[in-house]
Amino acid sequence: MFLPLLTALSVLGSSYAQISLVNVTIDKTSFVGVYNSTLGVDTFRGISYGTAERFKRTTAPLYNGNVTVVNATAPGVACPQVTVSSVEYGFGEDCTLLDIYRPHNTTSTSKLPVMVWIYGGGLTQGASFSYPGSGIVAVSSKMELPVITVIINYRLALWGFLGGQEAEDNGALNLGLYDQRDAMTWVQNYISYFGGDKDKVTLFGQSSGSMSIAYHFLTEDTNLFRAAILESGVSTSVPVLNASVNQPVYDALVNLAGCNNSSNTFSCLQTADESVLADAANSIASAPNSYSARPWAAAIDGEIIPDSPAVLTAQGKIANKPFIVGDVQDEGTVFVQPQALNTTDDYITWLGLDYVGRNAPFLSNETTLATLERLYPDVEALGSPYGTGNVSFFGEQFKRGASTYGDIHFHAPRRNWLEVAASKGMTSWCYEFAQTLPSVPEWTGVFHASDVFFVFLELPSTSPDFALAEQTVAYWLSFATHLTPNLAAALVGAPLWSQYGSLKTSLYMSSNETKLVVDNFRKEQIE
């Protein structure tokens, strides 16, 4: 039983300076984690929040059976995913796991606020072990705003977001979102054993993780969290359509998996070899134009997504909970093929066919296309990355396309979400993250996901940008602890951050200057 623990500790020795074991018991099950005395953080990794069978919702764990010792000293596996040939800790379908980071000496009576991270990756990539929560927890203790962080895995790609009529008929839509909800339920039931307060749970996530959080807001009476921080994405950032839209993807999967002659293709896929499905998933992902720009996506299922998020948001049917939401400055640069947009005709073709038709079908009509062409003129100085003048970087239309993409999928939905929230009297704060990472290509600008490095303190402490990372974390910790970001002013000298409200106040965040501004950039284009 303990040999694996000793083996894990020998591996951990390279990344943990001084290690000892810590233990938390739930009924008859003991979880053995590790204590890092340098950081002052206890870590429990790879804890199952439910047993995941293929294309089924998870089954919750029970802890009142036989006496059991769980080795939680090392990361668990990543969920199967696409276009990733290998990961450090391997893949496995029974991957509905979570990692817990807490300040040392936390007890079951500590009742610390809890921050639950939902990673991004387009619902096709990601793993909990890629986001170590120890830095946030260590800083939280130093700032005297101690929190527990929980980083969750959830199923991805065809395993978590299968579409098509067969998936709908068998209750297999949005399994990744149900995984997230099951992880939140586990936190409600068991985080108190680790010293957390189930009534003080803040969700935070980025990109598709942020969009996922916004989907959970569509359950208006949810009690699984009390607040949220949404980084680059809301429920209307990408179209959420009926499951039938991705029927061609399901049919392609059936053929690639050799199930096309089966009388029950869904059952055939359920029993297919894991490597066969992985190869099929990668084949589909490598040719998106043949099937769908988003072959695996959230879908309207009548439950976790009861109707179109665009319709529900317009009706104000979102949970009334405080939130922070924001974007990075250049959301679109990494999503546009740089060399593909050289001429105005290229831009128009991309806008009308390769982009709008597949990525934003709610925009696809000639009037809208003409309007977009006018709103985003052929002027490189106006394009993204912003503030780079007439530099082309790649094709002359690249910056034009990047600006269009960033506004349609991120800045415009965010602003609309904030306006709906303000009309409901919801408490909200808005930010624009405007700091580039060191040593990245200039054409990326403040690219999508660059803020994650700051949130998880993944910068050298000697970096001139580290102060901004500490400031960002201080805002996040203050909000998770007291439902206002403004304790950060006293902690790290950060500016007071006004709510969004009718004045549309936003926080502009950079290493040179963090300041309050009005959220009205590119007003005509976005609104």
Image (cartoon, rainbow, N blue to C red):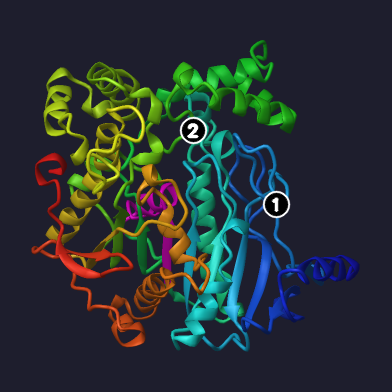
Taking the magenta stretch, the answer to whether it contains residue 204 is yes
Residue closest to the eye, 275 or 193: 275
Q: Residue at x 12, y 43 (%)?
A: 527
Q: In the rendered view, tell whether residue 459 sits above or below residue 344.
A: below
Q: CA distance from mark 1 to mark 2?
A: 21 Å
Q: Which residues are magenta?
A: 201-220
Q: Residue at x 42, y 57 (%)?
A: 437
Residue closest to the eye, 328 or 365: 328
**For mark 2, what is the residue?**
296
Report x, y in % for residue 303.
Answer: 40, 44
**For mark 1, what is the residue?**
77
Secondary structure type for disc 1: loop
Report x, y in % for residue 223.
Answer: 39, 65
Q: In the rendered view, tell whether residue 452 sits above or below residue 115.
A: above
Q: Residue at x 63, y 89 (%)?
A: 105
Tell me whether the residue at label 1 lies in contact with that at label 2, contact meaning CB atoms closer than 8 angstroms.
no
* Amino acid under disc 1: Val
Secondary structure type for disc 2: loop
Taking the magenta stretch, the answer to whether it contains residue 468 is no
* Amino acid under disc 2: Trp
How crowded pointer 2 is (Cα within 10 Å; few <14, some 14-19, many 20+) is rated as many
